[in-house]
Amino acid sequence: MTTTSHASPRTIDVALGERSYPVWIGPGLLNDRARWRAALRGRHALVISNTTVAPLYLERVAHGLDGLQWSSFLIDDGEAHKTFANVGRALEALAQLGATRDACVVALGGGVVGDLAGFSAACWMRGIDFIQMPTTLLSMVDSSVGGKTGVNLPAGKNLVGAFHQPRAVIADTDTLVTLPEREYRAGLAEVVKGAAIGDPAFFAWLEANAAALNARETAPLIEAIARKVQYKAGVVARDETEQGERALLNLGHTFGHALETAGKYKVLLHGEGVAVGMLLAARLSERLGMSEAADTQRLRRLLDAMGLPTTIPAGMDPGQLLALMRLDKKNLAGTLRLILWHGVGRAEIVGGVDEHDVLAVLQAHTRHT
């Protein structure tokens, strides 16, 4: 990826009345103190990051915090560290800082850091400001926007959390230069997901620009991030707390979260789980007569082109995966409620899905070796 720090950032607004906020996308934004410092309203700031990201970017953020009372709290890298124990440690760090109700938590990192930092901010004194500074593609296009925060339990992913919107999102695309290849590709899964849910023109654009995105070319990458964020911002503005339409954003997540949990967050990255989960949702839709085989194959080809996994990891048990899917937050009255589709760009929330059909799809696509 080439950096173009002279380029003007894209700005997308998440329209939520008095709680509206900007999402800035472009190179050099962490250094642009004049842009984001105004979002910090008080005297105290706690930067939450991880041991991988902080050595790379904390110093840049620190320059923008000059004059404030601030400290940092670091967690180890990885989904397994998005825990209540680390939320407790983050809250202790706020206490040691003497953080008052006008303090701000700054989330510098990927989705794990953003979710944990946002949840910590939601809990401290019943809710203080926080700012998202996503440093992974996945967090830029998905988890940093929309106010979902939370932590995992042994029983499942994101079972505890709160809706707590950030004051601003600063997506500095220069940080993607240091992102490992696997993490980058995992982020592309969330880009594909947005197009698969409700934007067939964007899906076709991704098919045409897959090679450029794989090469991390700056202009197509910023365009892809902006289009996905614009789509999600619209959905969040219409359905902030997921009473209806926002659930569509979870295409592939019920399957994907089960796969992540079954692998104890060590086998699949979140975006990889979403990629496999989307394809399983497409196959279930096909089995139920909602979509055609050609739709499934088109999705598989794009995921393949992005270098993403499309099969259930070897050794996972279909019965265990189904049991984990029963814990999904979208389920109602003890029945499975899944996001399925009628083909590219036409997703739908489907309740009362027969578990026998789900199990049949899982069994058909489980590898035993």
Image: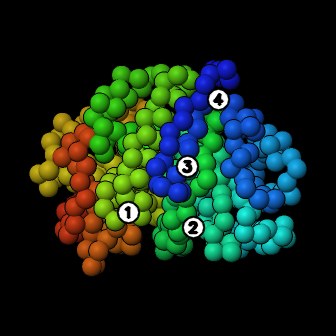
Residue at 41% over, 53% down: 237
Q: Tell whether label 4 touches label 1 (CB within 8 Å).
A: no
Residue 251 drawn above or below residue 338: above
Task: Inspect the image, locate mark 3, and give the three-letter code of the amino acid beneath it.
Answer: Tyr
Residue of label 3: 21
SS under mark 1 = loop
Q: Is residue 89 visible?
A: no
Crowding at mark 2 (Cα within 10 Å: few <14, some 14-19, many 20+):
many
Between marks 2 and 4, how big is the CA–CA gap? 30 Å
Task: Inspect the image, locate mark 4, and give the three-letter code of the amino acid beneath it.
Answer: Pro
Can you tell which mark lies on residue 288? none
Residue of label 4: 27
Q: Tell whether label 3 touches label 4 (CB within 8 Å).
A: no
Left or right: 303 in relation to 12: left
Of residues 1 and 305, the one drawn nearer to the viewer in this rendering? 1
Q: Residue furthest front?
A: 18
Residue of label 1: 242
Residue 274, horizontal then vertical, whole percent: 41, 50
**Quarter of the image that includes the N terminus:** top right
- Counting residues from the start of the chain, the first of labels 2 and 4 encountered is 4
Q: Nearer the viewer, mark 3 or mark 1?
A: 3
- Counting residues from the start of the chain, the first of labels 1 and 4 encountered is 4
Residue at 27% over, 66% down: 337
- Counting residues from the start of the chain, the first of labels 4 and 3 encountered is 3
Can you tell which mark lies on residue 151? 2
Task: Inspect the image, locate mark 2, and give the three-letter code of the amino acid beneath it.
Answer: Val
